[in-house]
Image: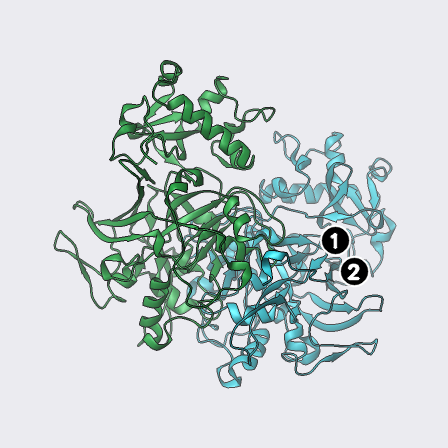
Chain colours: A green, B cyan
Amino acid sequence: MSLERSWVESANSAETDFPLNNLPYGAFAVEGGAHCGVAIGEMILDVTRLEADGRIEIEPGAGKVLEGCDWTAFMGLGPGAWARLRAALGEMLAEGSGDARMLAGYLVRQADVRMVMPFRVSEYTDFYAGKHHATHVGTMFRGAENALPANWLSIPIGYNGRASSVVVSGTGVRRPFGQIKGQDEDLPRFAPSARFDLELELGAVVGRPSEGMVSVAEADQMIFGYVLLNDWSARDIQAWEYQPLGPFQSKATATTIGPWIVPRAALEPFRVSTPERERELLPYLREPGPMLYDIALEVGLAPEGRAETVIARTNYREMYYSSAQQLAHHTTSGCPMRVGDLLGSGTISGPEPGAFGSLLELSWGGKEPLTLDSGETRSFLEDGDTVTLRGAAQGDGYRVGFGACTGTIKPAGDLPGWATE
Amino acid sequence: MSLERSWVESANSAETDFPLNNLPYGAFAVEGGAHCGVAIGEMILDVTRLEADGRIEIEPGAGKVLEGCDWTAFMGLGPGAWARLRAALGEMLAEGSGDARMLAGYLVRQADVRMVMPFRVSEYTDFYAGKHHATHVGTMFRGAENALPANWLSIPIGYNGRASSVVVSGTGVRRPFGQIKGQDEDLPRFAPSARFDLELELGAVVGRPSEGMVSVAEADQMIFGYVLLNDWSARDIQAWEYQPLGPFQSKATATTIGPWIVPRAALEPFRVSTPERERELLPYLREPGPMLYDIALEVGLAPEGRAETVIARTNYREMYYSSAQQLAHHTTSGCPMRVGDLLGSGTISGPEPGAFGSLLELSWGGKEPLTLDSGETRSFLEDGDTVTLRGAAQGDGYRVGFGACTGTIKPAGDLPGWATE
């Protein structure tokens, strides 16, 4: 594949995340609500307004699909509608399109708008499917001999997260309070998390519902697209709460997703296989073809008022299980899946220190603080820190990118009276 | 409190779950949808039709609140609206009401209708807040010395469940497949669960949203009402999957709730305190007053074509943490709560064998099978078994009950071709 040229000049740069090849789905605030748009170069095509003005029909007979301020209703129309809209917008925005003059009135500058949630999250599930991450964390907590749990090479380990705390890039993230017990303390205190962390993940957005078990191939076709995802984690709260039923409040403060859902169709040229299996998988988890993607990822950390340091560079192809495998596993019990379900990949870490997708790994449990370009050090996040995730698949002279997924840490604030002695 | 008499004669029986004192919220199927109703004796008052006909105004200016086939929109109106409707219906249904003749046309027999979901579940959280249950399970798995996890007396332990698999009483429950590894096996198999279990719980239905931390007192006021809840659990799938991030597919087959949401207001006369603390709680978890309820509970098990045996009798007052404490804890991280959130109490077991709220405890991990009245034995559930939960608070000559919460086990069926070798 090579660059598909657009009459929107900024979309033809080798540096943009948003060439015509991409056309990711987002939503931006307008007075009294939000509009759906697709990114093209430095601009957004306002598809809600196109539909309202009768310039485009999303689905014959379906009425105004994009009135709902986000892409959820459109996702629910299924893959036929996804393909038709993508083809229609691709033609309209292509170099030489006769619609250019008309469409120019429907472009807004990304720099001029505030992005909002691109879809309504039904339920959020987070996985633990990166072998390097699981090995690093396991080594810290249980030693190198017992790093991976016994089930890890058989199951894409997952747990249910909290949909209500999923927020869009740019939303401030308030440092949480919680029960924390130090190793030398007998009893827990109720205090702000002192080990607040990021997790670099990719989120798969489910666009088709299911009842009963689905195969990996079917699961892949249910995925509408992918977003960057930062699964903020309070390590000190987690350490005290997680036995025996898993993480709960430590993961419920916020999960930040990027503003742009990159369509699965745009990522097709970048498919790669999951790594060789170290233990044969049960038949229901075997993949009929490559289900990961070659997506370069990075994490930037900027202290308040300072320049950013890129603290990690890795790639989505490092995952041991694909989102399609995770989704297939999710349905084994008969669990129904719904439009808008969000599946976090699990932390994406490479094998080398510069490729770790969390501060827990980067500072090795806080024992080896990172030094930023500014000279400051970090074991975990400080108030005012801004974390930015970025990702892109590199084509021949173009890239299919995800935009920036950012969040800034706000101080915990004061406890209400009833929570103090 | 004593019985409040109604002109609906069956509501005045000391045996009915649904005297005028109760007025629980449910929904029943009608052609093309569902209507909202409140139970009164053996009847249901069709409140959707009352509203549609202009006989009652749920909330001035809010339009038709009950068009949506369930009580979710009404719950969202908040406690003022809850109190007004309860008072209005109480007057209309009271003995001597001038509306009796008109209202008689709005009564349907419970026996003639199929109940559907009374509200839309936003997210489902399950807790582990029964000390007897946690002690029993811990003893089986870790021995009596280490039965309770170190955090248990400090935290109402909870984990996020799956809202999409919450179903209403009467829905068949298909035995799940899953990864299962026997203790003498090296690798897991993909097979139907052979240790499929019930869990007797009460569910708290959240009727008011929150942002940021709420106190226990505030949390109590956010609860719209309570339902019976059976948290079906595949113990063999759970044993293999749950480390390190908790239960996932083992709890995702189905969670059955009773058809009737008993209003918090109807339970007020039955408030009791949580048991004495064995470890002082942090201030944010302390209760300003009694937050549990004296609700007698029982579990019935009927093999296919056989009579039911009551296998457990216990009481909600056995819980160590109240739903209000659980909800307050849920918000500590900043996690937003929403209308329709459902909080499972955790399995409600008493200290004695006849009071255990799961087969895992009743058969002590399968080692001591139960003998039913029919002479059959049970360690875990067999295909065709019907499980029925019941519960009621006993007043002076009346009871405030929850109706029956039932589910019948359907066989697992055949695996699709792609899931076999």
Nearer to me, A390 or A393: A393
Residue projecting furthest to the left:
A375
Image x and y of residue A70, in percent: 47, 34
Residue B21, numbered label: 1
Work out which quarter of the rendered image holds the C terminus of chain B and state it: bottom right
Task: Say which element carries label 1.
Answer: loop
Discs 1, 2 touching: Cβ within 8 Å: yes
Q: Chain of mark 1?
A: B
User: Do we see residue A421 in this rendering?
Assistant: no
Q: Is residue B297 left or right of residue A320?
A: right
Residue B398, numbered label: 2
Q: Name the residue at 64% across, 44% down.
A: B83
Same chain for the residues at labels 1 and 2, yes or no?
yes
User: Do we see residue B196 in this rendering?
Assistant: yes
Q: Name the residue at 85% across, 39% down.
A: B104
Q: Earlier in the sequence, mark 1 or mark 2?
A: 1
Instruction: Tell me which amino acid carries mark 1.
Output: Asn
Image x and y of residue B241, in percent: 51, 67
Choose top left, top right, bottom left or bottom right for residue A170: top left
Vertical comparison of B390 with B336: above or below: below
Q: Chain of mark 2?
A: B
Alpha-carbon span between mark 1 and mark 2: 8 Å
